[in-house]
Image (cartoon, rainbow, N blue to C red):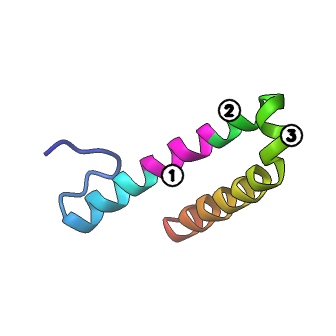
């Protein structure tokens, strides 16, 4: 098994790494879609809420791993 982020070899560590990568990709996707006027006009409020949610998740993850 290849080390993804933290070098953990446990199942929980691997799940955390995969969940973090998926969350990062989702966050980048939301930012990209929000930058397009056609999607921003329809889903702007949802994108803003998701971006705030991602920011909170990343902040908690940072504080926990200090």
Q: CA distance from mark 1 to mark 3?
A: 24 Å
Residue 29, percent from left and from top: 60, 38
Answer yes or no: do the residues labelled 2 and 3 have beta carbons within 8 Å? no
Query: Magenta span: helix, strand or loop, mainly?
Result: helix
Residue in the picture at 68% in, 62% down:
53
Mark 1, other Cα within 10 Å: few <14 / some 14–19 / many ≥20: some
* Residue 17 counted in the magenta span: no
Mark 1 or 2: in front is 2
Residue under pointer 1:
23
Answer yes or no: do the residues labelled 1 and 3 have beta carbons within 8 Å? no
Residue in the picture at 82% in, 47% down:
44
Which secondary structure lies at badge 2? helix
* Residue 25 counted in the magenta span: yes
Residue in the picture at 76% in, 59% down:
49
Which secondary structure lies at badge 3? helix
What are the residue bounds of the magenta stretch? 21-29
Mark 2, other Cα within 10 Å: few <14 / some 14–19 / many ≥20: few
Residue 23, percent from left and from top: 51, 52
Q: CA distance from mark 2 to mark 3?
A: 14 Å
Q: CA distance from mark 1 to mark 2?
A: 14 Å
Residue under pointer 2:
32
Camera-nearest residue between 45 and 21: 45
Which secondary structure lies at badge 1? helix
Residue under pointer 3:
41
* Badge 2 or badge 3: first in the primary sequence: 2
Camera-nearest residue between 3 and 16: 16
Mark 2 or 3: in front is 3
Q: Left or right of 31: which side holds 41?
A: right
* Badge 1 or badge 2: first in the primary sequence: 1
Q: Name the residue at the left extreme.
A: 1
């Amino acid at each position: 098994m290849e080390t993804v982020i933290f070098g953990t070899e446990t199942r929980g560590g691997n799940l955390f790494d995969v969940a973090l990568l998926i969350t990062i990709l989702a966050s980048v996707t939301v930012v990209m879609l929000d930058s397009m006027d056609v999607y921003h006009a329809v889903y702007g409020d949802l994108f803003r809420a998701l971006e705030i949610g991602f920011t909170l998740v990343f902040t908690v993850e940072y504080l926990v791993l200090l």
